[in-house]
Amino acid sequence: MRKKSFILLLLFISNTSLFSQNPLTEDALLEKQIYETGLIHAPLPLNTSRSFEENALKKEVLSSQPLTETEGADGWTHSGAGKMSFSKEKTTSGKGSIRLSFPTYTGKRAAGSPSDPDYATYGNSRITYHVDGRNWEKYNRIYFSIYPDCDGARVVNMNLTFTNDSSTPKQGYNPPSGSHLINLVNKQWNHCFLEIDEYQRDKVISISFDTALKGKDRTTGDSAIYYVDDIRLQQIKNPEKVSGWEPAEHTIIYSTTGYAINSPKTALAHANSCKQWKQFQLINSVSKEVAYEGALKQEQTTIGKFGVMDFTDFNQPGDYQLKVGKNITPAFRIGEKLWDNSLWKVLNFLFCQRCGHPVPGKHAACHTDLFSRHDGKSIAYSGGWHDAGDLSQQTLQTGDVTFSLLEAYNRLKTRNTPLAARLLEEAEWGIEFILKNRYGDGYRASSMGLLIWQDGILNTLDDIHSVRVQNMAFDNFLYAGYEAYAAMTIDRDPMLQEHLRKVAEEDFAFATEKFEREGFDLFKQMYEHSYNTSESQYMATISWSASMLYKLTGKAYYAEKAAETIRYVLACQRTKPLQDPEKTCGFFYRDQSGKSIVHYIHQSREQVYMQAMTLLCETQKQHPDYQKWVNSIQLYGNYLKGLMKYTRPYGMIPSGVYHAEEYSDSASFYALHLFPPANARQLYTEQVKRGVKLDKEHYLKRFPVWFSIFNGNTAIHLSTGKSAAICGNFLKDEELLNIGREQLYWTVGKNPFGQSLIYGEGYNYPQMNSFSSGEMTGEMPVGIRTLGNDDIPYWPQTNNACYKEVWVTSAGKWLSLIAEY
């Protein structure tokens, strides 16, 4: 035994030496954590010290009053499962706490709405404090402590719901109520808060705490208990900014990860800063010496006045801080390999979202008793990745993410071998899910809306056999392209490669046969992210998929199909300039009628147009239409360049050009806008006119037009950023490549709120809505939305779906964009 231990020690020392010479990252602590997970085979630990919540708890409290002493209201009531009691067993205030307890098993089947019966929980347990219409306008934060005592529960959370009398709405946008998800750590006191400065609170009705019964994971006990204590109403200094373009005073808005060498580097401050200070400094965070000094310039743009710091010409690699007056940022990097750390973290998020695989600290192997049925056959629908904060699944979304992982692998395989290898492994997990759900006749298990954990035992009460199954030509075209790309990428499993090539051709044939017989698919499942597919996007997808198969097989049939179908897409591109000063053109219409322009409100596949054009140029350089494809790329690239002035000095790509009456194309309008209100046309007009008028018929919108819960901008601007980077790489155009980089900067903090939208990356990242799997390093949300009908960014602390819900689509878009650099 002593000899064996000595050999293992020598191996460890040898490997440690090797790793130190070839570091995975430039962050020693992160590298240590990555190895401790077995290279992301267990979740990375959470770094809460840099989080929004940790920072905000340090704000100066001007006044603080215990809730019960302040109000003398009607008191607490309970509803739903379980019971409420008062307890001194667990208390942080010393006065006792409210105890909420309930069983984790109800003995009943989860029941949802008639239209989606299996998207359901086993109920809810809630405690409510009745305030009786008191005025809380002198307070701007609720502070409270929660102690979960939930046997065996790996993931625990509660919702805080704030309710004001909405019968007399105040002028402007002041929500009368809101529900805020709080991710908690089991079996310890969690000190929490919700800033309520944005809420209407002149006649507060109640606050309540509740949690849903989501079934039992492997380790879950029979009961759950939550203690709520020390609820305080507080007035704090400098409540958080929640809307608008202008930075908060006394803050510096910057990319909290850092900046790439030899590319633009800017940061922003409130315009008033220019009155107090004329210069900014870039300070070496190690030596504390001033490395660069520049002028703090005031700039007026289409969205307001700003103080702008430009240090583009500084390119010395290292860790730095920006300083303006007394304000100084945490350290960030200037250098190469800038995004590798984020890739490890986002990869960690995807691993934590695995379905059907045990994730330590999150869940056991799950959903093995969830099935699809077709033609007398049945397939277990466990695998891939859970869609979002819930436990839903979409096969095509797993396909999208798998392709992004493979793109990132191909970019990194010669530069960061360990990271590339782990990206490939995760992609292979996605490939398995794509392949296992094929029925072999064009049909595939496609999606499932789900909120519960199941027991994993067949023929029990929680078995589900309602996974959707479809034969969609569009889906099969996409799968064929993904399978072809995978066949060209995964070279360590020859038999898998051979199979991928075979099914790629089969799926393309299934899709082609159906498309030639029936034409464009009639998308039936509005919950699936292909529902809003336009005809031009559809044809671009066919062309891209055919080019992938041509690249794989060399068969002329696929080359001909790719060139043939792109002609429809070219006919949908606007080539005639609008009547605005910029002579805007280059965008795509949904179809050849030219009634509706391509937009997205949630999911986005904007990048497919340029993927199709550039892949044609790569694979068919001698084709007679080659110059038409190049012209299309140039036209679209110029369109993107023209958009950027409307969000300067930020770098977020605007949503684009809108026609004033797109609602008249009702088929397209209602395919795009899910669950629209009755006055959707009126709201469309109001939202469009809050944008920038370009000519008599067209407006420029910085954010999309959207009406329902399905909104958030991350996938949209990252997809368009991908398009910019594709064009930039093809045209050797640095301006377009920099547009893509700016989407990365916006995501990690160069936005009006100064918050990173990747948990654990950079600084000031908030909790996100992940009620099934808890907080995860690398999680990404659906994204920043807008305020009412305005065209301005809105990002409150209130943690709710779907804008703050975590989403693997956002992670995939992040991977895909970084793969361009």
Image: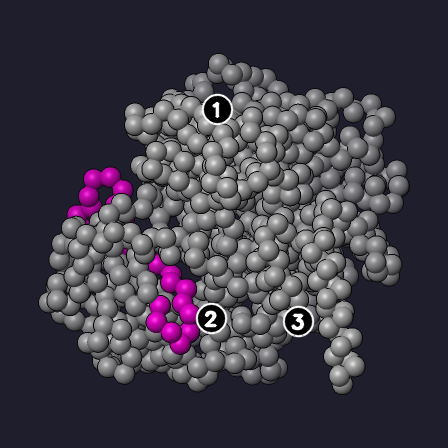
Percent x, y for residue 734? 64, 26
User: Is residue 278 in sight in this rendering?
Assistant: yes
Q: Please name the amino acid that badge 1 sits on.
A: Lys
- Asked if residue 702 can be seen in this view, the reply is no
- Quadrant location of residue 641? top right
Q: CA distance from mark 1 to mark 3?
A: 50 Å
Q: What's the amino acid at mark 3?
A: Ala
The crowd level at tag 3 (other Cα within 10 Å; few <14, some 14-19, many 20+) is some
User: What segment carries the magenta color?
Assistant: 164-190
Q: Nearer the viewer, residue 277 or 187?
A: 277
Position of the N terminus by quadrant: bottom right
Residue at the spot x=56%, y=63% of the render?
44
The residue labelled by disc 2 is 155
User: From what the image shows, is residue 22 above or below residue 220?
Assistant: above
**What's the CA distance linking mark 1 and mark 2?**
44 Å
Residue behind mark 1: 645
Asked whether disc 1 touches disc 2, contact meaning CB atoms under 8 Å apart, the reply is no
Q: CA distance from mark 3 to mark 2?
A: 25 Å
Question: Does residue 177 show up magenta in the picture?
Answer: yes
